[in-house]
Amino acid sequence: MSATDLTRALAQAVRGDVEAGAAARALTTMDASNYRRVPLAVVAPRDAADVAAVLRVCREHATPVVPRGGGTSIAGQATGTGVVLDFTRHMRRILELDPASRTAVVQPGVVLDDLRAAAAPHGLTFGPDPSTHSRCTLGGMIGNNACGSHSVAWGTTADNVRSLRVVRYGGGDALHLGRGLPDAPPGLHEFASSHLALLRTGFPALPRRISGYALDALLPEHGPDPARALCGSEGTLAVVTEATVALVRMPRARALAVLGYADEAAAAEAAPGLLPYGPLTVEGMAADLVREAAGLPRGAAWLFVETGGATPAEAQDRAKRIVRAADALDATVVTDPAAMRTLWRIREDAAGTATRMPDGGGTSHGSGAGRGGEAWPGWEDCAVPPARLGPYLRDFRALLAAHGLRGTPYGHFGDGCIHVRIDFDLLSEQGVARFRRFSEDQADLVVAHGGSLSGEHGDGQARAELLPRMYGDEMVGLFTRFKDLWDPDGGLNPGILARPARLDENLRFAVLPSRPVDVAFGYPDDGGDFSAAVRRCVGVAKCRTAQPGPDVMCPSFRATGEEAHSTRGRARLLHEMLAGEVITDGWRSTEVRDALDLCLSCKGCRTDCPVGVDMATYKAEFLHHHYRGRLRPAAHYAMGGLPRWLRAAAPFAAALNALARTRLPAALAKRLAGIEPRRTLPVLARRTFRAWAGSRRAPEAGPSVVLWPDTFTDHLSPEVGRAAVRVLEAAGRTPMLPGPGVCCGLTYVSTGRLDAARSVMRRTLDRMGPYLGRPLVVLEPSCAAALRTDLPELLPGDPRAAALAASVRTLAQYLEEYAPEWTPPRLDRRVAGQTHCHQHAVLGDAAERRLRERAGLSGELSGGCCGLAGNFGFEKGHWDVSVACAEEQLLPSVRAAEPGTELLADGFSCRTQLEQLAGRRARHLAEVLADGLPPEAGEAPGPRALRDPEGPPRRRWLRASRRPR
């Protein structure tokens, strides 16, 4: 039967969502591995009955099924060629949580952090905690037998599963699996009893032995326990619809001992000696993984050893005991929760961070995926006995060198489990052949040290082919028979574990273009190759984190919960667009366009994504090609050309403001411009910042600084510019403005009008010539970010672009760097508001934090994105997402602020969003600082002009910039 017949039968059989369109299929072709398989359809079941119905229909149509959770598997086991079961949409409920028995009953789509949050009020948690805890699901953890950093204390997922409800391929009655065999498939008891000797002797004794099937769980002395045997089966035996899991008591206090060693082998050799002290974690990593060693003790490798206690003093005392026993080069004990989170983030981001070599260089394998310092999973989590870890790491480093490869090991040293990303070349035939040779040699090395090919994430397609090297042919034959007992038709996740596919088949890079794609941006960190930029996304899915926090990424996913609106989802669609198999119309793709439509271009992923995916740039690139030679949406013309429209409107500001307050003209203008009807049009300044500056006489002051007159400050919030002038003058500096016509090109970039953007940027560089090399203060964060990043990336061959980008400073950065002697006014008030997303992503806010502290402005600004995001929130069709983003952090923080709290928002978008949604006026930091300055002497007599440092004193500010060039 055809795929159409299959999807029609599925739609008739289930209440959940059945999707067979190009977008749905493209979003699930990959997980976080090197592999890619194209499904026929994706089904999001609503309940166990739906799951059984899908399995029945698929058996009738001889179609394979693969269950999928968060899609963070790194060995290819969450991809499939038939029907993908997506449990993250509907089957994500915690059905029961019993503090007395310390158990919880969950559906397979429950995100781990959601379970931990529900258990926390009772002093409980779920012990296993992989680094993807904010987005991985319990079903996926059961499928892979996930572990995490606390396994030395609380074990693997299998150790914490009490019972499972599962459905086999073909549907039928659900099985309730626990200790004993009454509800197991027929023949399982006979299978186990006839192979007792091999089951007792054929498995290495390891804390992290995940490879193969856990057949030893069927031994009589272990229960037998078919539920435990199913853990780690990677969706090949049955589909979990409900799980009862054990919860553990959380220590009331924690401390972190960070131990420094000469190298990773020394750290690894020290780790087993710390286990008798009862640590919660013993994690290790080397210096080649750490971009900034701030907060780490002296050394080239470190152990993170967490301790717990009933009181902070008890936890700290245990950490100090470990320090005394550790024989480390250097050590520190951290008890501050914020400092501990900062350190743990280095470790948790490693799965993404390790995909880029620290020096940006890669192997010299030719034109393959190793170019540019890229590194990939494949041998991500081998495990050896902890006592063998030091010698194993030395041999592993030698094996990498022998194959001309590089990797960055890190991981669970207390359990002997090592993660590593290796700079394989997975594009060229020679590189793939090297990948295979290394994999075979690596398997032999692990076995020689008494280890397991997988110590956490499963075998999948990456390692299952090599299981005979670890277990021998007889045991692997038992694996196949075990699979057939559960799934005689072979419909569940074929090619994984039993009868595995070759490890060098289905590689996701093979479908990408062999030559660089013609693009507008320079992509300097990816060798100018758009394909390389897109393949940055390795699928770790940090962008799918649903809980708000200090980061920005990914606001649209948190608003919609849809994979298509995550950074990973959009990267996957772009990958498939380049591949041309599922999405066949290239840059004209409506699937990609629709997914990118709700991207706010917040740039959060540029910093928050562990591998630096820059979806704002990719969106601008796509829109540039998608609409090339075609009519664009009205908003692209209206808001994309905003600088031009505002300059033309400036003489008529009063009249236009009056019309904007009149219902019919305002409605007509918004309709013609593609603006959301519920938005209020911003008020135009009756006197622009430039006009004010040009009529003002400057006081005698010190060194000059160029102040950027961005469009928003000039035409919509000139009070910000005026305040910045006062602050700079108070700091002993003389502000000067460049001539008319300079523009960062932001609005053209955000709407994908890249030809126009480059034209505007070239004109700007021409007019900024006399000022290159001087510090440039930019008040609007989005404009500063555009000058810092978009300008040099759109004009990579123009050295002036790099020079101008390097000169960009925020007001706080400039004051800290060039006027460190200045003391800001002491304001002593609380603040609330939001750090601009572009500032967070591109510029950082450390200088702003320090300046606020010096000025006595206490309190934290919220993270996330305000939701207006330049043109995004004004465009028709974006209202709901825009409001949802604002309601995530910004609006609640403002509502919760005490009376008299100062609302800070340096971005015009953030201030506009607050005004329109909350009726509250926020101010730029410059305005707040100017409040505390003494009144200007002689202000009453009349207007003054600023001194032009390039000419005689008291000359008009703009005279020099108006001279012919």
Image (spheres, rainbow, N blue to C red):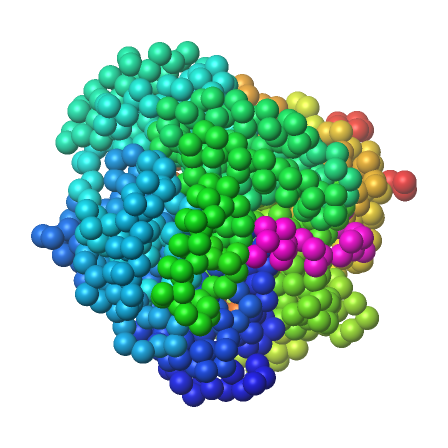
Q: In which quarter of the image is the N terminus?
A: bottom right
Q: What stretch is highlighted in magenta?
A: 501-522
881 to the left or right of 505: left
Q: Is residue 515 magenta?
A: yes
**In the rendered picture of this protein, how many numbered marks are placed on residues?**
0
**Figure quadrant of residue 239:** bottom left
Residue 335 in view in this figure: no
The residue under the point 78% across, 40% down is: 366
Question: Which of 7/654 is in front?
Answer: 7
**Figure quadrant of residue 914:** bottom left
Give how far across and how far down residue 863 sits, in percent.
Answer: 43, 47
The residue under the point 70% across, 62% down is: 579
The residue under the point 39% across, 72% down is: 169
The residue under the point 46% across, 78% down is: 58
Give how far across and how far down residue 915 sits, in percent.
Answer: 45, 59
Q: Is residue 212 above or below residue 667?
A: above
Question: Which of 520/29 is in front?
Answer: 29
505 to the left or right of 516: left
Give how far across and how far down residue 14 sits, in percent.
Answer: 39, 82
